[in-house]
Every structure is written in structure tokens, then in C-alpha cells.
Image (spheres, helix red, strand yellow):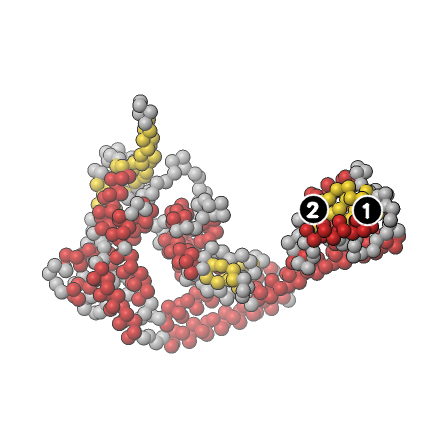
Amino acid sequence: MNNNNKYFLYARKSTDVEDKQVLSIETQITELRAFAKQEGLHIAEEFIEKQFAKIIGRPIFNRMISRIENGDANAILAWHPDRLARNSVDGGKIIYLLDGGGLADLKFPQFWCENTSQGKFMLNIAFGQSKYYVDSLAENTKRGLRQKVRRGEYPGLAPIGYINDVRTKTVVVDKKRSVIIRKAFTLYAKNGSRLEDISNFLAQSGIHSRNGKRLHRDRITFILSNPFYYGHFCYGGEIHEGKHQPVVSKKIFDKAQEVLKQRGRPHHKQKNEPKAFCGLLSCASCGMMITGEYKVKHQKNGNVHEYVYYHCTKKSKLKCPEPCIRQEELDRQLSSLIQKFFLRPDWAEEMRGMLEKEKSESAQSSTVFVQESQERIRAIQTKLQRLLDGYLEQDIEREIYRLEKAKLLSEKKSLEEQMARIEQKRTGWLEPMAEWIKEAGNLPKITRESNLFAKKVTAKEIFGSNLLLGEKSVRASAPKILNSFGKMGGNQWDALRASHLLALKKPLSSVLVRPGGIEPPTLGLKGPCSAN
């Protein structure tokens, strides 16, 4: 067959769902070359593209069209018309070139097309079918996503702490990372850690950005304000109830939001970035905060020494006489202070045994409160349905509907968590106490290691804001509460330190347990190691 036209071979495959049944690039090229040889077609050049065709802007396709307009070729060979266009603009270009004479011929192994009125009519139908397929597929996809949302399933990429289960097509908890995320929420909710501290904590726990760097402040803010972690999720500008397992409680999440709101002023990057122990100590002379400063010393012999010093910010009107202290010395003193609050292994073992016994014997009934909460939840469900009816009837604006729905869902989630806490009122303290025993027993390891951030978190937990630095010496401030166990106002850490002294005079059982039993006087773990 004699054919003097010069053909551009065009092969395309995208990663769209609709392209799953389309031949691969390699197979298309093989089939097209065989077809060209069979038909005696002269292939001037091959163009291969891996991109969607549903929107305009394909660079290789546009370059091929420009070459045709310049006269480098006057025909195209492709597997099917949908390889050339799935949108009206690109399809219109092809037909316009056929009308104007820029294209003399189109060849497809599986589709008949000639440069005649009937051929262009059939080609137009093929392009229209391709566009209709893409449009209907998009609508079906959106419809499927909306149905998933109605079922409480998140139709997107799982956030940090969760993973997308490809087998069940659901979002499940990442057992390792979820613990780290929960700890990050707890650290921030206590109002003692900054966003930079949380970023450092996540980095040290193996959670980084995709490029391996520490997560930025904005990313940390997004994580801490994502309702997904307490069981809801945001989709289409609305809050929806999710079926996934929460990582943090609504109570902790709300506390984190309060801290974020309090600290929501604009952040200006400091010339001297905050050091590890910043925000932990106060000046013993003037009461101002202690800050860290990086220094570099250049010697005449060419040696360079780097240091980190801590000193008073000297923001008081009074002249502060306190000298600075090296980070290594401050680290040593803090480690020495923390070491005094460790929990002996035999004590930890004894207390774990008591906890197990208490867990097997404890039971609590709270029928009245649960029934009242269930009634309130049913009332909220009714309000939600009325709100939805009003929105569908167009009596309520979309923005008002979204805001009111978010409020009602938040209230419902809080009630559900309150019910869960009340139902386990007597046993709810067991888990935090077991965690505290683990933390207290782990203090020697923390003091031996060089992780300054871990030491800061531990010191903040034990001493709060009661650490002072004066005359290059770290100490806890004087007791502010009378009849307390010591400097920290009678918390579990102070009681533990006092217990070390009492253990020399009294039996172990009377040191570890107060007269009322091992259960704390309140649910907040105020005194798990009460010293009599």
C-alpha cells in the first residue's frame, strides 16, 4: 500500500482508574509499529507521554501538534482516539487540523477514521464518548466518596499515627506511631512544651517530613488541631463522625486547642534559636527566665570551639548579677536532681502487683449518669437531624449548617467520653499510674543518656516551674504549700523522694501505700506514692 504521508506515532498511558484496561506504553508501541509496517506507513518520529488527558496542557502532545503545524508531519498514528484526547479542547484541535489541511490522515488499529465528513463525524463522536466516560467516572467517584463519608470512613490519605489498610480500604491505627502522637498531644496540652519541642520530640521518635527533615511549626499546628485524632474528620469543609479508632481523648484534644489559641500570636523567628533547656528555669535573683546562647570561640592557633551558655534574660529593671553556666554543667546538675526521684525496681514490682490485684477487684456502677448522658446524646441526634432537614429544605445557609453541626458533634463526642470515664471511674487511674511507675523507673536511664529534650520534659514533669538557677547552681524553689511532702507541693514525685527517706525507718508496705489503700484520693493521680 502506497502512502506518502509522514506520521507521528503517539502513545499515552496515565495512572487513571479508567486506564487500567488500556495497553501499556510498551505494548502500544509494539502494536503500532507492527500496524505501520503492515500498512506501509512512514513513521517520522515517536512521541511517548505518561499523563492524564482529561485536562489540557500535556506538554508532549502540544509539542507534537506544534510540529504538525510547522509541517514536520501531516498524519498521526495512535492506538485509539481516547489516547489523543479526553477533553473538548484537544479533540477540537485535532478536528480543526483535519478541517484546515494541517492533518491529512489519522490512523488507529482499532478505529476507522478517514479525512471525510463522515470520518470526522465519527471521530467527534469518539472524542465525545471519551469525555463523557471521564466525566461520568468523576461523578461516580465523587458519589462513592460521599457514601464513604456517610458511613464514617475517611476517603483520603491517613494522617501520621494511622495507616491506610489496602485490604479492607479503611484507616487503621499505626500501633507504634500512634503512641508517639498521643504523647505529643499530652506534652503540648500540659502547656509546658512549645511547637519546636514537639517537633524535636517527633524527630527523635523517628517521625520526620518526607524529605527527612524536622516537621515545621505549621505542620505541628495542623497535627495538633486535626479532629481526626479524637474520632472525627473534616471533609468538604464539614466535620463528620468517623468509625476509626481515636488516638487521643476529646478532653486532651480540647486542652491542646486552648493552648494553641493562647499562643496564637504571630511568630517571628529569633536570630538565636532556642536551646534545649530554654523555658525550664528561672533566675534566682530577679525571677526572669533563663535563656540559652550559642557561642563560637576562635583561637589564634586556628582551633574553633563551640559552646552553649545559659544565663538570665536580664529583662528586669534591676541589674541582675547572676553569671552564665555552660550547658554541660547544667546538664550534669539537672541529671543529679532527677536521679533523686527514681523508683527502685523492687518498689516498682511491688506496686505493679498491687495494681493488678486492684484491677481484678475494682468495679463501679454509674447507671444514673449514663442514662442521663444517653438521653442528651439522643437529643443531640434529633437536633442534628432537624439541622440537616432545615439545610436540605434551604431554610438554613450552608455555612451556618456547618458551624452548628460541628458544635453538636463536638458536644456529642465529649458526652460519649464522659460516659466512658464514669463507667471506669474506679479503674481509670490504673493506666496512668502504671505509666507513672514506668516513667519513674526509667529515670536513671534518662539521666545517663545525652537526650537533653527528654531531660527537659522529665524535669518539667517533676518540678514544674519551680526550678531556679543562681550562682551557677540549680535548685528547686521553696515550698509554697504547707503540710506538703516537700518542694513540689506534695505531688507523686515529692512523695517518692520522701519515701526514700522513710524507707529507712518504716516497712515497705507503709511507705508505698497510704492508709486508704493504693488508689489515689482523686482520679487525677495526685499521690500514687503517698508517704505516711
- Eyeballing the image, is 438 above or below 197? below
Q: Nearer the viewer, residue 213 or 39?
A: 39
Q: Nearer the viewer, residue 75 or 232?
A: 75
- Farthest-out residue, left: 505
In the picture of the structure, the residue carrying the numbered disc 2 is 48
Kind of element beneath mark 1: loop
Among the two numbered marks 1 and 2 on one chain, the one whose residue lies closer to the N terminus: 1
Quadrant (top left, top right, bottom left, bottom right) of the C terminus = bottom left
In the picture of the structure, the residue carrying the numbered disc 1 is 41
Task: Please state which amino acid type lies under the numbered disc 1.
Answer: Leu
Q: Is residue 32 left or right of residue 185?
A: right
Kind of element beneath mark 2: strand
The x and y percentages for residue 220 are 45, 49
The quarter holding residue 505 reads bottom left
Q: Residues within 10 Å of mark 1 (few under 14, many from 20)?
A: many
Q: Nearer the viewer, residue 354 or 250?
A: 354
The quarter holding residue 297 reads top left
